[in-house]
Image: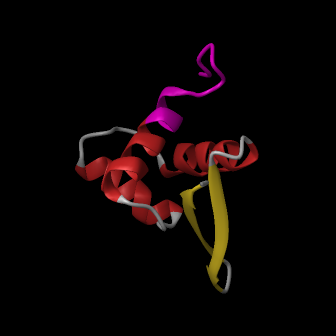
Amino acid sequence: MVAKHGISRISRVILQYMEENGDGLDAETLWLELRKHGHRMCVCSVYINLKRLEKMKRLQKTQAADRKYVFAMNK
């Protein structure tokens, strides 16, 4: 579900977490961290929202290893 400003609830949670706790996380690590903090979402939702945030230029995706990418706030 996308909010009126084009950012879903999950995307807002992701952005807030990255602003408060630093960035440079891969999708699975981010998903596990969000679940530790009580957010109930599937890993697929995290991947979809990371991709959406990258397209919106809110996050930057960088290849860290073979087929592994990390995401950081776009400055």
Q: Nearer the viewer, residue 38 or 24?
A: 24
Query: Is 26 located above or below residue 43 in the figure?
Result: below
Q: Residue 38, position in %: x, y?
A: 24, 41
**Could you tell me what secondary structure mostly forms the magenta stretch?**
loop
Q: Nearer the viewer, residue 27 or 44?
A: 27
Q: Residue 4, position in %: x, y?
A: 62, 13
Whether residue 51 sits left or right of residue 17 in the image: it is right
Query: Is 34 located above or below residue 26 in the figure?
Result: above
**Residue at the limit of the structure toward the top, as seen here:** 4
Query: Is 9 located above or below residue 16 in the figure?
Result: above
Residue depicted at x 24% and y 46%: 37
Whether residue 37 sits left or right of residue 46 in the image: it is left
Residue depicted at x 38% and y 60%: 22
Instruction: Report how many numbered discs are placed on residues in the image.
Output: 0
Residue depicted at x 60% and y 49%: 50
Residue stretch rendered in magenta on the structure: 1-12
Q: Is residue 11 magenta?
A: yes
**Residue at the limit of the structure toward the left, as seen here:** 37
> Which picture quadrant has residue 68?
bottom right
Whether residue 35 sits left or right of residue 61 in the image: it is left
* Quadrant into which the N terminus falls: top right
Residue depicted at x 49% and y 51%: 43
Q: Residue 30, position in %: x, y?
A: 42, 58
**Residue at the limit of the structure toward the front, as seen here:** 75
